[in-house]
Image (cartoon, grey):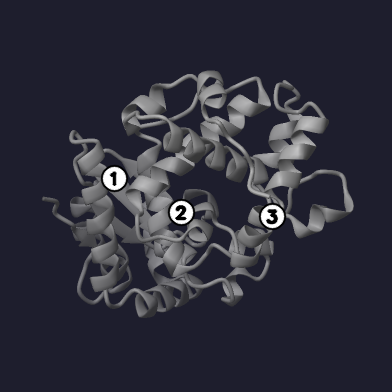
Amino acid sequence: QVVVEIDRFDQKFYNQDLYSLDALKSEYPYLFPVQNHDSVWHQKRNDRDENELFKKADKIFSKNTKLENEFESLFKHVKYYFPKFREPKVVTLISNVDYESKVIYADSLLVVSLDMYLGKEDEVYSDFPAYLSNNYIKSQLIVDVANEIGTSFYLPKPQRQFVKSIIAEGKKMYLLDFFLTETSDEHKIGYLIEELNWAKANEAEIWKYFIDNKLLFSTDPKLNTRFINNAPFSKFYMDLDKESPGRIGVWLGWQIVRSYMNNNNVTLQQLLQLDEQELFKKSKYKPKK
């Protein structure tokens, strides 16, 4: 059993006729840093651009039923695998397109910036590169939430070897397989469908490239930038680069973890504790040709 509470702080904040600033500060002290003078908040409430962002978000998220159902399903799955999990109160706000803080999770509280999910075609994202703005869509909100909650159960330590790094990332992705059972793979990893199809079609070639260039056990930190960090494409330094999606190492690590779980009888909790090197050896991973 879980309780889903979505508190639309954004509706209260921009509706000055119904909610005074003093009342909001009393109800949501954690959203009003004491060092900020009231004039800052009055200016924010009257800012034309922010009010426009709120109107757009309010239109998209006016019916909370689907969102509530997604949160309920997510919370139930998390609690099933991690019984000590307590579902947080969900508070929505407008962050003025703060793309680095789309979702903030802290135990009993989950803060979501609705203006980061207006749709990739919205003009407010026109200055963002497509590989980022492609995921500023409504359906990606629950994925970002699941990722943030997942970090409370598994936050990998920095790894020196490339293969350990991609497997650690693969574990994070595998959590989403358990948390978001109705979500497609392309949404879990934030790919377009054609990018996911490219990864599947080229899986054997990607693996061969890593083997031939002796990258798996390399400790070169540049490999993170080339194949793990968010980027418009992965960097093989070949003609195919611009066809590839970014983070291809994350996708490959995910497939290795899936292969391990298909060939070994362990629980999700045991998987998260498992040494990446041992996982790799026992994964029996073989790329699809």
Q: Is residue 146 left or right of residue 70?
A: right
Nearer to us of marks 3 and 1 is: 3
**CA neighbours of label 3 inside 10 A, class few (<14), some (14 to 19), many (20+):** many
The answer to whether marks 2 and 1 mark residues whose Cβ atoms lie closer than 8 Å is no
Q: Earlier in the sequence, mark 2 or mark 3?
A: 2
What's the mark number on residue 257?
Answer: none
Q: Position of residue 84 (x, y in %)?
A: 18, 33
- Please name the residue that numbered disc 3 is placed on: 245
**Residue 200 figure quarter:** bottom right
Of the residues shown, which amino acid type is indicated by label 3? Pro
Give whichever of discs 2 and 1 has the lower sequence position.
1
The reply, left or right, for residue 11 in relation to residue 176 is: left
- Location of mark 2 (residue): 102
Q: Is residue 239 visible?
A: yes
Q: Is residue 200 above or below residue 46?
A: above
Percent across and percent down for residue 222 are 76, 31
